[in-house]
Image: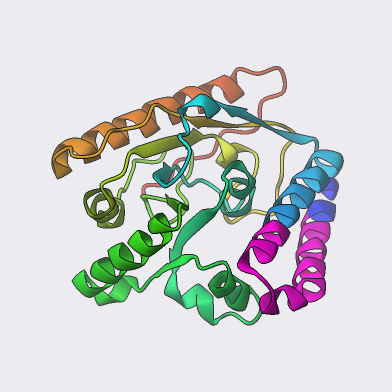
Amino acid sequence: MIRSLLFVVVFYLNTAVFLVLGFPLLFGKRSWAMAGLKAHARASLWWQRLIVGTRMEVRGVENLPKGPVLIAAKHQSAWDTFALIPLFEDPAMVMKEELAMIPLYGWFSKKFQHVFVARSKGPAALRKLIKDAKERARDGRQIVIFPEGTRRQPGAPPAYKPGVLALYEGLDLPCVPIALNSGLFWPRRSLARYPGTIIVEFLEPIPPGLPRKQFKKVLQEKIETATARLVNEAALSANPPPLPVISQA
């Protein structure tokens, strides 16, 4: 717990330093700001490895095509929101519109030209989501979405939202699913951090053009099956993290 608390302090100090010292990047090229975003992620992962002993392993990179693509990633932890970013050439993250209102963080998110969604606006929000995502894809960027919209405990029942279905239909791009087991090592709603290896796995792309119901079924089966395998792999390791008590919420 001492190592966990030390890392939490260092992580937020590291983030504050990047935000403050990186402030001039708000007035430069977007590519410069994106380089700063990736540097923050790499620095955070380095501190996590140094203090807590948590490493990162990436599998299946051969499944990630070049150019614009839809990425649908499992979401178990706050770790996912920064650690995945350096894995892509030029990602545009789908995120809640409210986050754009946060000083500095929101300003940078706009500078990065992420894709914001106002979930309370229903169909209108989905139409704008598709419009903005198409613009980012035309620029050759990877559109990254967490299909469940919020963090889910490892082993919790899946809860996929309509956003990923709308993007799949609207973008007409291959969709690359991502499985991971980050929630075991960086649990949600907890200050605890655990040593071990977080595994991120790119799965085989789903081609565009599938009917909506079929796409959802294939996507969910791919992500949930692979994620369960990665969670089980961590549970059987020499020094396993504690398995969470499953919440249905």
Residue 18 among those drawn in magenta = yes
- Is 198 above or below relative to 88? above
Location of residue 13 in the rendering, given as x and y in whole percent from the top left corner: 82, 65
Colour setup of the view:
rainbow
Q: Residue at x 85, y 49 (%)?
A: 2
Asked which quadrant contains residue 61, the reply is top right
Q: Is residue 180 above or below residue 5?
A: above
Numbered-mark total: 0
Residue located at (60% from left, 49% from top): 85
* Point 60% across, 24% down: residue: 234
Query: In front here: 94 or 160?
Result: 94
Q: Nearer the viewer, residue 201 or 154?
A: 201
Q: Is residue 105 left or right of residue 227?
A: right
Position of 225 with respect to 56 (left or right) is left
Q: Nearer the viewer, residue 84 or 7?
A: 84
The boundaries of the magenta stretch are: 8-37
Across and down, in percent, residue 99 comes to 52, 73
Q: Position of residue 207 (x, y in %)?
A: 27, 33
Residue 105, quarter of picture: bottom right
Magenta span includes 14 = yes
Residue 38 in the figure: left or right of residue 165: right
The reply to whether residue 60 is visible in this rendering is no
Residue that appears at 28% across and 52% down:
171
Decide whether the magenta segment is chiefly helix, strand or loop. helix
Q: How far from the left and from the top, in percent, is residue 161?
A: 29, 54
Q: Is residue 34 visible?
A: yes
Q: Nearer the viewer, residue 244 or 44?
A: 44
